[in-house]
Image (cartoon, rainbow, N blue to C red):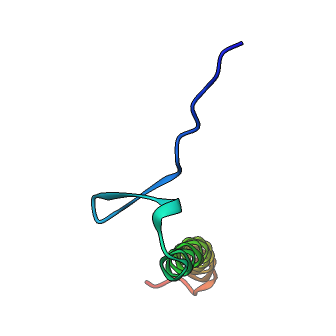
Amino acid sequence: MTKKKMEAAMIKINDVDYKLDDLSEDAKGQLQGVQVADAEVKRLNMQLALAQTARNAYMQALQTALPAKD
């Protein structure tokens, strides 16, 4: 049976590695806020991509619906 040493969870902030266990409760709370904000930015970027795709489709449909120009 092989024993594996458990490594502490780490996070890199501004190119500095920190052990999560060494962070204060305040720092952990701030980190959680950053993670929630990052997730929201990702979600909004996906929503924006969907809206841009829909806009492009509407523009194509509009162009075909316009009367022909001589």
Q: Nearer the viewer, residue 3 or 57?
A: 3
Q: Relative to 5, is 18 above or below? A: below
Farthest residue to the right: give it. 1
| Total count of labels | 0
Instruction: Tell me the residue at 58%/86% (across/down).
Output: 66
Residue 64 lies, in percent from the top left, at: 60, 76
Instruction: Tell me the residue at 53%/40% (across/down).
Output: 7
Residue 13 lies, in percent from the top left, at: 35, 65
Q: Quadrant of the N terminus?
A: top right
Q: Nearer the viewer, residue 46 or 62?
A: 46
Q: Relative to 10, is 42 above or below? A: below
Instruction: Tell me the residue at 46%/85% (across/down).
Output: 69
Farthest residue to the top: give it. 1
Q: Nearer the viewer, residue 54 or 50?
A: 50
What is the quadrant of residue 36 in the picture? bottom right
**In the image: residue 65, left or right of residue 52:** right
Q: Nearer the viewer, residue 18 or 32?
A: 18
Q: Quadrant of the C terminus?
A: bottom left
Residue 9 lies, in percent from the top left, at: 53, 51
Residue 8 lies, in percent from the top left, at: 52, 47
Instruction: Tell me the residue at 50%/74% (across/down).
Output: 31
What is the quadrant of residue 32 in the picture? bottom right
